[in-house]
Amino acid sequence: MKKVITYGTFDLLHYGHVNLLQRAKALGDYLVVVLSTDEFNWNMKQKKCYFSYEERKRLLEAIRYVDLVIPEESWEQKISDVQEYHIDTFVMGDDWQGKFDFLKEYCDVVYLPRTPEISTTQIKNDLKK
Ligand code: C2G
């Protein structure tokens, strides 16, 4: 079984996220999504999520491409995640191009093109209009 992993906040889940998850799953048979906790988002990404971790987890678990959702609590957990879950391929959108190449020692690293016209920030801004 080929196992794939990806990381993210996935707040205000939208089709850009789903496009990423669909393509990530297509690279293997099992997709692990490592979901940023509320504390990690606030302390490390300065992101205030609209939906809580549990709500975002619930939404991701309803997506057919997602097999497991686990918490992301630190920037440093990727190597241990890849080893613990026997991951073959690490996937991120290309806004992170090159940032995780250190993982090439442990698994394949794939950066996929983002869906250009949608983002959580844009959704929030559009709703303010
Ligand atoms: N994404 C995408 N197209 C968009 C928006 C997002 O392909 N229009 C991808 C991002 O590139 C990322 C994933 O969807 O791979 C999740 O996006 P975010 O929730 O914004 O993730 P981010 O805050 O970048 O967290 O340790 C890594 C971080 O947890 C990544």
Image (tube, grey):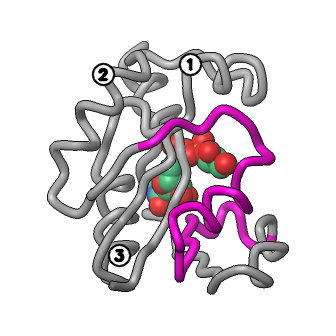
Question: Residue 65's spot in the image, x, y percent?
Answer: 23, 63
Residue on which disc 3 sits: 23
Q: Are marks 1 and 3 in contact (CB under 8 Å)?
A: no
Q: Earlier in the sequence, mark 1 or mark 3?
A: 3
Whether residue 21 sits left or right of residue 113 in the image: it is left
Residue bounds of the magenta highlight: 70-98
Which of 97 and 129 lies nearest the eye of the viewer?
97
Q: Are marks 1 and 2 in contact (CB under 8 Å)?
A: no
Residue on which disc 2 sits: 55
Can residue 123 be seen in this snapshot? yes
Q: Earlier in the sequence, mark 1 or mark 2?
A: 1
* Label 1: element kind: helix
Question: Residue 23's spot in the image, x, y percent?
Answer: 35, 75
- Residue 120 position (above or below residue 118): above
Instruction: Say which amino acid is labelled 1.
Output: Asp
Residue on which disc 1 sits: 38
Q: Quadrant of the N terminus?
A: bottom left
Question: Residue 40's spot in the image, x, y percent?
Answer: 67, 25
Q: Quadrant of the C terminus?
A: top left
**Mark 2 or 3, closer to the camera:** 2
Q: Which residue lies most toward the front here?
A: 84
Which of 84 and 106 lies nearest the eye of the viewer?
84
- Which residue corresponds to the image point at 40% horizontal and 73% vertical from the top-left? 24
Residue 92 sits inside the magenta stretch: yes
Distance from label 1 to label 3 (Cα)? 26 Å
Q: Quadrant of residue 109?
A: bottom right
